[in-house]
């Protein structure tokens, strides 16, 4: 039996088993999750598309995130992360979507939303959930940790008996 050594390989195997496709909606990671997925040969079998929606206007125009939602909660928030994940699925051929929005730094943080704060939205076969994490380090470290967490979060939700709670 082949040993799957990376999160992307694990995710690919799970998606292939189910015949599902993945779409990403990335803000602070700027397409790094999509890039990690498409590094794997054969990813077109399970990766449909990635949206890099860095600006608020892009979130609204590309993914249908309500501008009023952004105005009420801020771009870095649970409701926006969830809306990104839903928008990625609705605007693709995917059954699985991940939305990522955060503050990678070194600027842009506040006491309420410090640098390193990242919200994740997960839409897996109609089940929507979200998580917030706070990562340390510089901009590159925050972005790398967010990519890994997104991949691991998808794996946890797709694997048999996976995490499906809101």
Image: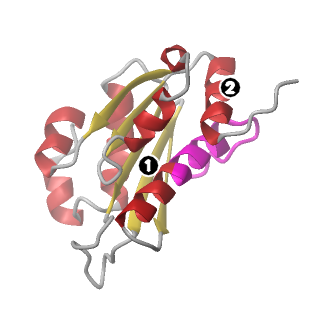
**For the magenta stretch, what is the residue range?**
148-166
Task: Say which residue label 1 marks.
Answer: 121
Disc 1 crowd, CA 10 A, few/some/many (<14, 14-19, 20+): many
Q: Which mark is residue 138?
A: none
Label disc, if present, on residue 13 of the rendered structure: 2
Residue 63 relative to residue 124: left or right: left
Does 53 sit above or below residue 77? above
Q: In this view, does 65 lie to the left or right of 37?
A: left
Question: Which residue is drawn at the image coordinates 49% and 25% (left, top)?
Answer: 95
Query: Residue 92's spot in the image, x, y percent?
Result: 35, 22
Query: Whole-percent x and y of residue 131?
Result: 50, 59
Separation of residues labelled 2 and 1 (CA atoms):
21 Å
**Which percent across, then down, holds residue 111?**
29, 85
Quadrant of res 85: top left
Q: In this view, does 106 lie to the left or right of 8?
A: left
Q: In the rendered image of this protein, does residue 18 appear above or below residue 82?
A: above
> Which type of secondary structure does the marked residue at label 1 adopt?
strand
- The image position of residue 161, as x and y in percent, is 76, 40
Q: In which quarter of the image is residue 60?
A: top left
- Residue, x 15% and y 41% (percent of image)? 58
| Tally of numbered tags | 2
Residue at position x 67%, y 28% from top? 14
Front position in the image: 89 or 146: 146
* Extreme residue in the right direction: 1
The one nearer the camera, 156 or 30, is 30
């Amino acid at each position: 039996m082949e040993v799957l050594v990376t999160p992307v390989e694990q995710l690919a195997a799970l998606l292939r088993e189910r015949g599902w496709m993945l779409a990403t909606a990335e803000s602070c990671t700027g397409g790094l999750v999509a890039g990690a997925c498409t590094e794997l040969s054969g990813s077109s079998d399970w990766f449909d598309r990635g949206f890099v929606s860095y600006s608020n206007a892009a979130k609204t125009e590309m993914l249908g995130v309500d501008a009023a939602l952004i105005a009420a909660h801020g771009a870095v928030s649970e409701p926006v992360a969830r809306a990104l994940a839903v928008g990625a699925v609705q605007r693709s051929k995917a059954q699985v979507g991940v939305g990522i929005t955060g503050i990678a730094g070194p600027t842009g943080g506040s006491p309420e939303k410090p640098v390193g704060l990242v919200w994740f939205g997960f839409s897996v076969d109609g089940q929507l959930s979200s998580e917030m994490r706070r990562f340390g380090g510089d901009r590159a470290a925050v972005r790398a940790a967010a990519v890994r967490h997104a991949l691991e979060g998808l794996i946890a939700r797709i694997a048999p008996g996976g995490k499906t709670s809101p």
